[in-house]
Amino acid sequence: MTTLWVLLGITAFFVLLFALRFGIDLNFDLAASPRFVIRIGVGGIFGEIYPRKKRKPLKKAEKRKKWRLFHRKKPKKQEETTEKAPPAPLSEKLKQLSALLKAVRRAAHPLCKAIHLSIDAAVVAASDDAYNTAMEYGAVCAAMSMLTPTLYQVFSVHDCSIRVDADFSQPKFYARGQIRVTTTIGGLLGAGLVFLFTYLRVRPKRKRKISNRKDNNYERASDQRHDGVEFGQNS
């Protein structure tokens, strides 16, 4: 019974680990002075990584200690003389590249489906001229009508809210919003396994070199036959 509970605990741990969600959160404000805030998090808890907080300047004594610790001279290694293998022909390189692209294409679909996308943005078309504002508004609406279905086809979209407006009082185009991209360890592992199996199946096989050397026993037997001595007898 104890073994069963241990196995159930290990299974539950790996299930929770593979289902753990992590990702990147981007807040942007494309106004007169563009501003970006990037957060990274695991399990819904996000921490800011950009812009970085300014550190206090170190004193001269602390700088010297830090320089002594991290900038020590490393001993020079003796150069080893090794024979370089001849470069592979271009045809083999192209075959390897095509196999790699096939594996990436096969693994891209499960990877994109494992990515959850959430967008909440507001785009405002504006310019000095009313005619240009109307043209920009129509162009942005056309682009959004093509982009939104593509996002739903490629990714697993959790929420997609993109609002497009026209402001005839503002002199410049601006946009602000939030984009969150998350995935799970299990999704990445599945895409990695698809990539690995596909690459192992379609990669080009290396040709083995056929050696023209004869077997030593065969040479000895032929020599003894020429001398009139049967193979296996002592002289």
Image (tube, rainbow, N blue to C red):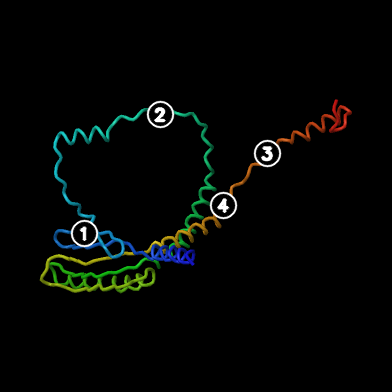
* Mark 1 Cα shell of 10 Å, populated few (<14), some (14-19), many (≥20): some
Question: What residue appears at the point 56 percent right and 57 percent down from the top-left corner?
Answer: 201
Look at the numbered disc 4 and give the secondary structure of its residue: loop
Q: Nearer the viewer, mark 4 or mark 2?
A: 2
Amino acid marked by disc 4:
Pro
Q: CA distance from mark 1 to mark 2?
A: 44 Å
Sequence-wise first label, 2 or 3: 2
Q: Quadrant of residue 148?
A: bottom left
Q: For residue 77, which numbered disc appears in the image? A: 2
Instruction: Measuring from the top left, give residue 197's x and y in whole percent.
Output: 52, 58
Quadrant where the C terminus sits is top right
Q: Nearer the viewer, mark 1 or mark 4?
A: 1
Instruction: Measuring from the top left, give residue 165's x and y in whole percent.
Output: 19, 74
Query: Furthest residue to the right?
Result: 228
Instruction: Measuring from the top left, give residue 88's x and y in whole percent.
Output: 53, 42
Amino acid marked by disc 3:
Ser
Q: Do the residues under discs 3 and 4 have CB atoms within 8 angstroms?
A: no
In this picture, residue 212 sits left or right of residue 28: right
